[in-house]
Image (tube, grey):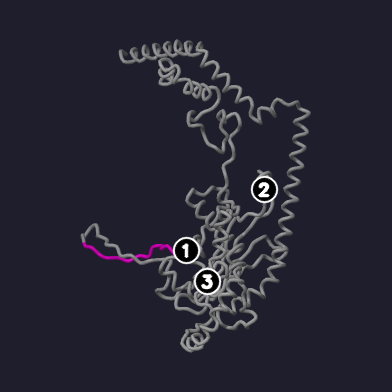
Amino acid sequence: LAVGGFDTGVRSHLAKLVEKLTDQVMQNPQVLAALQERLDSVSHTPSSYIETLPKAVKRRINALKQLQVKCAHIEAKFYEEVHDLERKYAALYQPLFDKRREFITGDVEPTDAESEWHSENEEEDKLAGDVKDKVVIAEKEAAAAEEPNPKGIPEFWFTIFRNVDMLSELVQEYDEPILKHLQDIKVKFSEPGQPMSFVLEFHFEPNDYFSNSVLTKTYKMKSEPDKADPFSFEGPEIVDCDGCAIDWKKGKNVTVKTIKKKQKHKGRGTVRTITKQVPSDSFFNFFSPLKASGDGESLDEDSEFTLASDFEIGHFFRERIVPRAVLYFTGEAIEDDDNVGGLGTPKSRAVRPPSPPPEELALPGRSWEQGPRPDCPPGSGLLGVLWGVLLDVSFRARPVCCVCLLLV
């Protein structure tokens, strides 16, 4: 009882002290001016302005939003036709890509006309060539008999993997011998009338690691406004992907590793050694992707990042690597990417910015994208405003405000 009475007395005393200090603070002109400034900033938000408009004007604004939704559906139709054009022109590109593969593998040797190339420094090259021609003719003739002439362009695609940071980060040392057998990468677009998607095909020559001649990765896309949030539509987005089974030869699976573990019997106390297989980092995990959640449940942060990275890599293969392979082999495309500040991340469902909080929960002077103000605690409304005001003026009215802050 004594403790209870003491606690009640302390609470009563603190309540009176807070009331007294609050009265003192609210009589401070600096506090009142700062509080008014904060309240003014709250009232100047876009949503607060909309709320002040007459009902007739709000009705017209709703009509504009209806038009905006219709615009989003027209934009979706535009992207569907773009996909059809991509499919059409992919068929025109394919004969050139087939010939590229023949040159890379050495199945076909380019003619003199096909192998002629004029560099940007053609003038300088020509002058230098004229000066050197007479000197090096004899050397070339002598070296021709000794110079190695490998078939095709050895390790063409593997070199691209090494040159591109996004890909080299996925490749482990034990992946390298396998990737040296990669002969071609193709992109196949979904047929008319089918859901929008594309397939990456990785073609391998016969090797000692797996029996598949082709490994595939399918990326499923969506190109229609979200019914719940139609204004967020910005074009097709990758929403899911499927890999394929790799038929590894015995003892050659680089996506798992075998570890040994000692296990003690609880009863007899004997110790035995067991072996088990655990996942191992490898580029070939690319063909066993994480599945996007299709039941409405959200993925954890690590899974979202993994899935978004997968979508980005698939998009990069489709848009950059396959169409411009020789330039990534020579490094010229990498320099171009660096000069323009890198490539944008393709839109994906896995990583989407959070929805803004309701305006009545937003802190003054701070947009939701910027996060909470450093001088305001989590919270909203008048308490949040008053907290910020007290911090703003605490350096000018320290004796009063610092005590009040502790009590708040």
Q: Choose the circle earlier in sequence order: 2 or 1.
A: 1
Q: Quickly name the residue at label 2.
A: 233
Percent coordinates x, y for residue 353 in the rendering: 57, 44
Picture residue at 39% right of the left edge, 11% below the top: 13
Residue 168 is tagged as: 1
| Amino acid on which disc 2 is placed | Phe
Image quadrant occupied by the N terminus: top left
Picture residue at 59% right of the left edge, 60% below the top: 315
- Regarding residue 408, the answer to whether it shows in the image is no
Q: CA distance from mark 2 to mark 1?
A: 33 Å
Percent coordinates x, y for residue 247 in the rendering: 49, 73
Picture residue at 62% right of the left edge, 83% below the top: 112
Prevailing SS of the magenta stretch: strand
| Amino acid on which disc 1 is placed | Ser
Give the magenta part as a residue range.
Answer: 270-283
**Kind of element beneath mark 3:** helix
| Amino acid on which disc 3 is placed | Trp
Q: Quickly name the residue at label 3.
A: 157
